[in-house]
């Protein structure tokens, strides 16, 4: 990856929220990552923005003590803002990385992501998107495919749900015991293409970030699949956490009005029939 610093930061950057006693959401500039587990063993879900490794290591020590490291890193997908610190963290911690099988080409140097679509209907972040790196990273043998049955080996009690659209191997993570959903970018709670909304983190239910989503039909089906789980709490890759009635109403509205709310009116990856 071109390991350049991306100059975009929200008001929540540096914020840590304990969604549950064993789930901590950490915001790095404009993206969320998650520490899941406790002192006995924990997993990092996603790996933040480019050049954020030191921040993540500092937060790790605050939560779990000096020299702490996860059992593994689990990725919702491989876009730059979710794997920004990954190579450095893997080098530092020497732990396995898990991702959906369809995401592996982007994590083993075999395939770059499609270029962001700056022409897509949307705000300033969409216009800035050509500067976002799309080059594959190469973790070699460090990355493993998640089992096809949805189990996540280092995360007992959780399962992975294939939620493609934003990327081919995008997953969301769900814990049935307390219906906690870590949705990745399958849907988000901020209008991620609009700079003002990103900076201020104004809450609204949106589909996946527009400038990097290449399959809107799949994205729509994925949101429907997550709504059917009836999550009690959800945390997304961008935006703030949401729970209870706000969450069920927001998801129901997004499912019912996905074409108007989420799908852009125009852009390189928008089907002709929208």
Image (cartoon, rainbow, N blue to C red):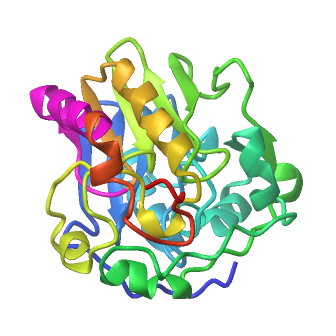
Residue at horizontal 28%, vertical 67%? 14
Where is 228 relative to 52, above or below?
above
Magenta stretch prevailing secondary structure: helix
Which of the 4 quarters of the picture holds residue 192?
A: bottom left
Is residue 4 visible to the viewer in this orientation of the structure?
yes
Q: Is residue 82 left or right of residue 201?
A: right
Indicate the quadrant where residue 268 lies.
bottom right
Apparent side of residue 115 relative to residue 163 in the rendered image (left or right): right
Q: Nearer the viewer, residue 34 or 172?
A: 172
Q: Position of residue 79 (x, y in %)?
A: 59, 63
The foreground one among 212 and 57 is: 212
Q: Residue furthest left?
A: 245
Task: Give the image location of residue 27, x and y in percent.
Answer: 33, 61
Magenta residues span 238-255
Work out which residue is located at the far top of the displayed protein and give it: 177
- Picture coordinates of residue 12, whole percent (x, y): 22, 66
Q: Quick one: quadrant of the N terminus? A: bottom right
Residue 232 colored in magenta in the image: no
Identity of the residue furthest to the front in this view: 273
- Left/right placement of residue 165 relative to residue 248 reads right
Q: Residue at x 25, y 30 (%)?
A: 233
Asked if one can make out residue 96 in the rendered structure from this viewpoint, the answer is: no
Q: Is residue 80 left or right of residue 195?
A: right
**Number of marks in the rendered image:** 0
Residue at left offset 67%, top offset 48%: 168
Residue 71 % position (x, y): 63, 38
Q: Residue at x 61, y 53 (%)?
A: 167
The quarter of the picture where residue 92 lies is bottom right
Please state, as top left, top right, bottom left or bottom right, where the C terminus lies in the image: bottom left
């Amino acid at each position: 990856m071109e390991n350049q610093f991306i100059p975009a930061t929200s008001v929540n950057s540096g914020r840590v929220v304990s969604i549950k006693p064993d789930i901590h959401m950490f915001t790095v500039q404009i993206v969320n990552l998650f520490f899941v587990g406790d002192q006995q063993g924990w997993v990092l879900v996603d790996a933040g923005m480019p050049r954020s490794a030191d921040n993540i290591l500092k937060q790790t020590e605050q939560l779990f003590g000096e020299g702490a490291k996860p059992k593994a890193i689990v990725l919702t997908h491989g876009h730059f803002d979710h794997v920004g610190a990954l190579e450095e963290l893997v080098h530092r911690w020497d732990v396995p990385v898990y991702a959906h099988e369809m995401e592996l080409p982007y994590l083993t140097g075999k395939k770059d992501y499609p270029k962001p679509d700056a022409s897509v209907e949307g705000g300033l972040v969409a216009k800035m998107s050509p500067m976002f790196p799309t080059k594959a990273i190469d973790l070699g043998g460090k990355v493993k495919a998640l089992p096809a049955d949805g189990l996540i080996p280092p995360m007992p009690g959780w399962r992975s749900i294939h939620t493609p659209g934003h990327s081919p191997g995008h997953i969301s993570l769900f814990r049935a015991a307390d219906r906690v959903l870590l949705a990745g970018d399958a849907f988000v709670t901020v209008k991620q293409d609009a700079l003002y909304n990103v900076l201020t983190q104004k809450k609204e239910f949106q589909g996946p970030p527009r400038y990097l989503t290449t399959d809107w039909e799949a994205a729509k089906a994925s949101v429907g699949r997550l709504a059917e789980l009836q999550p009690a709490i959800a945390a997304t890759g961008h935006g703030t956490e949401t729970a209870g009635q706000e969450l069920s109403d927001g998801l129901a509205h997004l499912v019912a009005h996905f074409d108007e709310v989420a799908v852009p009116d125009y852009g390189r990856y928008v089907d002709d029939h929208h």
